[in-house]
Structures are given as C-alpha cells and as structure tokens.
Image: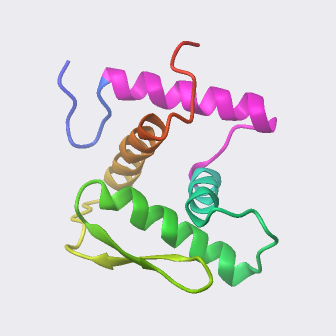
Amino acid sequence: MIATKNELDEETKLKWYKIIFQLKKQFGKKPDMNGLLYLIGLRELGTSRNMNKEEKMDLFHVATCKLLSYDGYYTYSHTDAEGWPHYTLTRKPEFTDLLGQEILLRKLIVRYFDENELYDDEE
C-alpha cells in the first residue's frame, strides 16, 4: 500500500505506535502531540529546569522548528547566551489541513526518535 500525503506508510506507523507505547510505559500515560513536542523541546534545550508558561511555549516552538528542519522548512541558526536554540524559516510549510499537519509531525517525530536512538525498535 502506498501512503498518500495524509497518511503514514506502514513502517512509520509501526514505529509511531512503538514510540507511543514505550513513552506510555515510561511516564504512565499515553503522550499527546503537545507532550511529545514538550519532550523534544526539553531535549533540544538540554535542561529540565522549572519553566514558566512562556518558556514552555518556547519549547513547543523549538521542537517544531527542529522537526520541520528535517524537511528544510527551518535551518538551525544559533544558540543564544541562555542556551536556547534558534532557527530561521527557510520556506513556509504548505499545510492543507490539520490532518496533514498531524501526519507530517508524526513522520518527523519518528525520524527524530530514530536518528537520536530514543526508543527500542526491538519491542
């Protein structure tokens, strides 16, 4: 079966569910998209200190930019004096709808977990 733009291919779908299952085992509840972006943002920032609401929102932005950089939408620019990574928009994502956005993020999250060896693919 060939995946269309609004669905994941079978291999990516299987990896997605493995990631979700392992995170559920680790944290005791199934993570939603915001939870995944928060975890990626924390990892990219490299710290888990207490964050205020604005900083938590910045973590979502950092994670989203990091993920979209895989497809060339953003390019890493620099890390500021406080340790926050910054990205530059290279081209605007052409999302047609929320489902397309969700599918793209899932695909990129799987890639992020793959490239950073953040889950056990053997389970």
Q: Position of 113 compared to 72: left or right?
A: right
* Magenta-span inclusion, residue 24: yes
Q: Quadrant of the N terminus?
A: top left
Left or right for 30, reference 79: right
56 to 67, vertically: above or below: below
| Relative depth, front residue between 102 and 82 | 82
* Image location (x, y in percent) of residue 99: 37, 50
Can you say whether 11 is above or below 44 in the image?
above
Q: Residue at x 34, y 60 (%)?
A: 68
Q: Position of residue 17 (x, y in %)?
A: 53, 27
Q: Residue at x 66, y 28 (%)?
A: 22
Q: Which image quarter is the C terminus in?
A: top right
Q: Which residues are magenta?
A: 10-33
Q: Is residue 41 magenta?
A: no
Q: To which quarter of the image does residue 65 belong? A: bottom left
Which is the main secondary structure of the residues drawn in magenta?
helix
Answer left or right for 112 relative to 1: right
Which quarter of the figure has residue 69? bottom left
Where does residue 59 sit, x and y in percent of width and height?
59, 69
Which residue is nearer to you in this view: 101 or 51? 51
Residue 100: give x, y in percent of width and height: 31, 51
Front residue (pair 85, 28) = 85
Pick out the residue farthest to the bottom.
81
Horizontal relation, residue 99 to residue 27: left or right: left
Query: Is residue 58 or residue 95 the one in the foreground?
Result: 58
- The residue at the point 52 percent across, 84 percent down is 80
Q: Does 66 appear above or below 21?
A: below
- Furthest toward the top, the residue is 122
